[in-house]
Image (cartoon, rainbow, N blue to C red):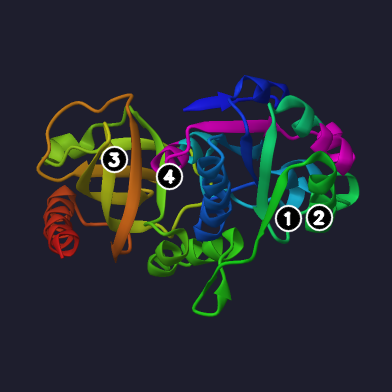
Amino acid sequence: MQVLHSIEQLSDIPGPVALAIGVFDGLHLGHQEVIRAANDHAHGHHGSVVVMTFDPHPLHILRPGSAPRMLCSARHQERILQDLGVQTLLRYPFTKETAQTEAQVFVKRLVDASKPLGCISVGHGWSFGRGREGNIHLLTDLGEKHDFAVYGIPPVRMDGEVVSSTVIREAVTRGDLLKAARLLGRGYAVMGRVVDGRKLGRQLGFPTANVEVENEQAPPLGVYAVHARLDDAWLPAVANLGKRPTVTENAEPTLEVHLLDWSGNCYAKEMEVRFHTHLREEKSFDGLEKLKAQIQRDIEAAKQLISQ
């Protein structure tokens, strides 16, 4: 994937440029509709799709005390966009200066950089610019002035509820993985790099990958049946998201993943872990042998669930 970091770099993209603009935290079904509109425009006009997002989340600058936990990290967002077929991402730095930019000035920069600007696709309720003065109505007026199309995508509803990052975040927090998956269009996942661990799992006969999770939002602690993506292959696995009370006191939560019927070295590799089913809560066992027996039961349960 090509990642741009300034508006001026749009001049290197073959036009007409079809921009899909938003924060896109989680890249849920609503976000995907915004991107789809830009993609359709690009295909119809032999142009290029560019997804434009902001880093960090604007609320981290505007209201840092109330900034939400993110559903996906920057690198994970890029991975999901690649899965959606997006080839170019503009990750625009959001600063206090950005927040003070007039809406018309912001759009004019996009127009001047693109060769040419074919369209802007946003969620219908999206606002931008100083004091959130920019909205779909102003954007439509600017589109007429500067000769680019504007798509304001209405909210996507699922079971009568608007699909939003906030609703998904709440579902993940309480462990409602089925609802999160419906709104995302895929199972909820976290991503991180495999780091060195205590290797206790290997001693027990169940080697685990210790994933240093980048995502801020996690489901409740516990043991899960999961799929883990390693080297672009999805593998069945069991994951423990917790503090390992049997072997460690007062530990910070970690994510340990045991890949089923797999052997090899995944140290330092990226791993995406998609949560399938919550198997049980984490608990302390009276000795490693009882822990080992429970892990075996977890593996058997995971195999049955994932194969269904």
Q: Earlier in the sequence, mark 3 or mark 4?
A: 4
- Residue 26 colored in magenta in the image: no
Q: Earlier in the sequence, mark 3 or mark 2?
A: 2
Q: Which residue type does callout 4 highlight?
A: Leu
Q: CA distance from mark 3 to mark 4?
A: 16 Å
Nearer the camera: disc 3 or disc 4: 4
Q: Which residue type does callout 3 highlight?
A: Arg
Instruction: Mark 1: give few (<14), some (14-19) or many (20+) Cα within 10 Å.
Output: some
Q: Which residue type does callout 2 highlight?
A: Asn
Residue in view at x 41 percent, y 40 percent: 191
- Please say if the residues under marks 3 and 4 sit with CB atoms less than 8 Å apart: no
The magenta span reads: 79-108
Residue in view at x 67 percent, y 52 percent: 122
- Write down the residue under mark 2: 135
- Write down the residue under mark 1: 126
Look at the numbered disc 1 and give the secondary structure of its residue. loop
Residue in view at x 60 percent, y 62 percent: 166
Q: Which mark is residue 229?
A: 3
